[in-house]
Each structure stands twice: as structure tokens, then as C-alpha cells.
Amino acid sequence: MDLEKFLYHIPRHFKLDDLMAGTNNFSETLKLGQGGFGGVYKCNLAQTNEIVAVKRISEGSKQGIKEFISEVSIASRLRHRNLVQLLGWCHELDQLFLVYEYMFNGSLDRRIFTKGRREEESQVLQWSTRYKIVSEIANALLYLHEEWDECVVHRDVKSSNILLDRNFGAKIGDFGLARMVKHERLAQTTQAAGTLGYLAPECVASGKTGPESDVYSFGAVALEIACGKKAIDVSLVEFDMRLVAWAWDLYSRGRLLEGADVRLNGEFEEKEMERLMVVGL
């Protein structure tokens, strides 16, 4: 495939020299995270005084190139306040890079699970912020599934793929596994993909995913936000480490609010907490 022709509709073409200078030659100290097929780095572009995030596709990774093409072809066409915006790309010296808006408060998982790597990440998110975040994630999925020209199945909705801006606004990112399906052909769902704990049981059995499987993943994230526990949590041995099973048990015994994140110290609206956990289930 001629990548230059494939990428022509994306307005910004970044230069490799600028990306290397802005990341201090892709220094580990500026690394924001590591995906299955490459790292993501904080980049300060001196010429425009912009801070961006650069995803570097691992050299020689066929799957990485497939994800690159998927992400470009889908993310470049989507426009929604709760989706991470793709700014541009770089293809030089047989290396591939995607450039995104920089999300100053990092990924959701670092904010709702145990202590983060940095002091500011260890601060407990207030209930009002959590409730706003989950509403914004739902808005993004509604847009992807029903409001765009085609249905976009993300296939990897999870807390580490939800990023937070300066004001803790939530945006879904990482469209490397996403697929587009025409609305009239939704019955012909795509091959299964995703992450353990967020993947709907029927997807494992059938090998297929669709909008409904994204909604299942959203439910798992909603429970994580409410409970402060991971979808697969080692503390839940009695329930095969599954957060969903633990929450169902509390619900069946009429003790759902006992599942609220203990770090909130009871500072939440009980009706909202119950509503969020029921929606999650």
C-alpha cells in the first residue's frame, strides 16, 4: 500500500526531526504508556509551542501496521468532544507515527486504581467528577454506534483507553482495533477482539463483536469507576477475580452500596451510585 496516498486526507504531516526533538529522541522519561504495538510519548513541538502525544508503531510489526491503518482510516473521520482527536501523522525512514492531542490528566485507570506513578495521580477522584466521566463515555459510544454515518465498533473499551483532559473531561482513544459496519448490516458483526474482563461472554463463545459488546465493556468500566476495583481484580478470589460477579452478588443480597469505592469515604450521592452500578450490571 502506498501510505502517502492513503494518508493524504489528514491535513497535518509532521516531520520526524520535529518529533524526535520534541520527545528528546523518544526518551523513556517522556513515555506516557506502552500499547501492544508501540509506545506513546509526550512531545513538545518547539516551532508551534504545542504539546502533543505521539504513538510510535513498532518496527516490523505487521499487526502494528494493521492497527495504524485502522486507526487512521477511522479516527481521522470522527469528530466528537468525547473522542481523542487525531492531529496528524509521520512516515519517514520506514517508521510510522500518529500524533494526537495531549491529554493532561492521563488515562482513567491511573486515576481510579491504587496509587499512580506520580503524586497527582494518587489523588482520589471526587464522585461528581466520576459521574461526569461515565456520562461522557456514554455520549461517545452513542455517537460511535448510532450518530455517525456508519456504526463504529471500538472493540477495546476499557479504562486505560479513556483519557482525561485538563478539566477531567473524558475522551475515548485508541481505535487500532475498531471496525466500521454499515447500519443496515449490523447483523454481520466483526471478529472478536478486546481485553479480558471487558469482553462480553457471548463474544468469547461466538467469536463475534458488535455495538452490544462495546456496551458490555462500558458496563465493566462503569463498575470500575463506582467501585475503584479492576474488572479483573486479584482481591476478588471468591468470585474468580471478576468484578461483575462480585457486584452481582452484592446486588442479589440488597447490599449494592457496599461496593462503592472505600476511598470516597461515603462522599457520594447514594441514588447516583446505585444507578451507576445498576447500569453497569
Image (tube, rainbow, N blue to C red):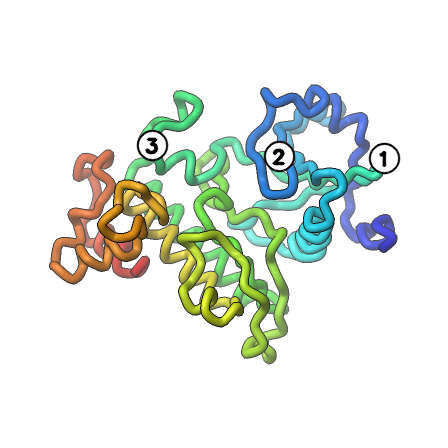
- Report the residue marked by disc 1: 93
Q: Is residue 29 above or below residue 252?
A: above
- Could you give the CA–CA distance between mark 1 and mark 2, rounded to whole angstroms? 19 Å
Closer to us: 155 or 197: 197
Q: Secondary structure at mark 1?
A: loop
- Residue at 52%, 61% (x, y): give it: 143
Q: Amino acid at mark 1?
A: Leu
Q: Position of residue 239 (x, y in %)?
A: 25, 52
The disc at residue 114 is: 3
Q: Position of residue 96 (x, y in %)?
A: 76, 40
| Of callouts 2 and 3, the N-terminal one | 2
Q: Amino acid at mark 2?
A: Val
Q: Is residue 111 above or below residue 278?
A: above
- Residue at 45%, 69% (x, y): give it: 205
Q: Is residue 56 above or below residue 249?
A: above
| Of callouts 1 and 2, the N-terminal one | 2
- Could you give the CA–CA distance between mark 3 and mark 1, rounded to whole angstroms? 41 Å
